[in-house]
Amino acid sequence: MDSTAVKAYSQRSLDNRTGKSDREARVGRARRGFLLGYKVHAVCCVGCELPLAFMVEPCNRNDKCFIKPLLEQLKSQGIGFKTVLADTQYDSTKARKTLREDSAEPVIPHRKSSKIRNALKVGKDFIVRVVKRLVRVFRKRVSVERLFSRAKEWLLLNHLRVRGVEHAFIHACLSFSAMLIVALTAVKQHKPSLIRSIKHYTTQ
């Protein structure tokens, strides 16, 4: 589970919080400073690195607000889950309680300031240290980052040319749908090794 910021098709308004031509976009924290736009919140399978559920919301909304809605999407599709991986943006007692209520193990690093002993934490050197099993599991979280990377590099997820949260959702839906079509095509061709190879099907 993770989110990625997508820049709005608009300049900032004078209040420096909303968009000039996209009044639904908001200024929020992104990977490199602050950005006017939206966030795509997504859950993916660590095995196949394909999207299972996603939402699009203004960039200023906190990631933790979307844990429960995303899990509800999974359950409505009959998708089960035993472990949920997320970064420190999702670190909270409430988030962990929500996951445990669904009988899922939360693998979420505590913040560096946490006093909890033997807790999963990311050090100043960005190395995760704690019980080896949790470290091995947490490293699989890179799958959702790869998902966003492929969607942005090959499927124009970050090339928003529409305005409003509803149209931003449709834009993200088209990117992820194309990703799933590639995977479905690979499976039908009996080439499971190509389910993530967008390049293979777009450069032929």
Image: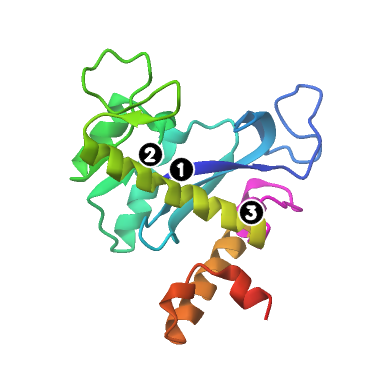
Q: Are marks 2 and 3 in contact (CB under 8 Å)?
A: no
Name the image quarter holding residue 17. Answer: top right
Residue at 59% across, 57% down: 151
Q: Are marks 1 and 2 in contact (CB under 8 Å)?
A: yes
User: Can you give x and y, in whole percent of width and height, for residue 46 in the image?
Assistant: 37, 55
Residue bearing mark 1: 2
Q: Which residue is mark 3?
A: 152
Is residue 117 toward the left or the right of residue 149 in the image? left
- Between the residue at mark 3 and the residue at mark 1, the CA separation in whole angstroms equals 15 Å
| Residue drawn at point x = 66 percent, y = 33 percent | 26
Task: Report, in whole angstroms, how far the alpha carbon at label 2 lies from the one at label 3.
Answer: 20 Å
Q: Which callout, 3 or 1, points at the residue further toward the start of the chain?
A: 1
The numbered mark, 1 or 2, whose residue comes first in the sequence reads: 1
Q: Which residue is mark 2?
A: 86
Q: Position of residue 16 (x, y in %)?
A: 75, 23
Task: Give the side of residue 101 with respect to residue 66, left or right.
Answer: left
Q: Residue furthest bottom?
A: 189
The magenta stretch is 155-170
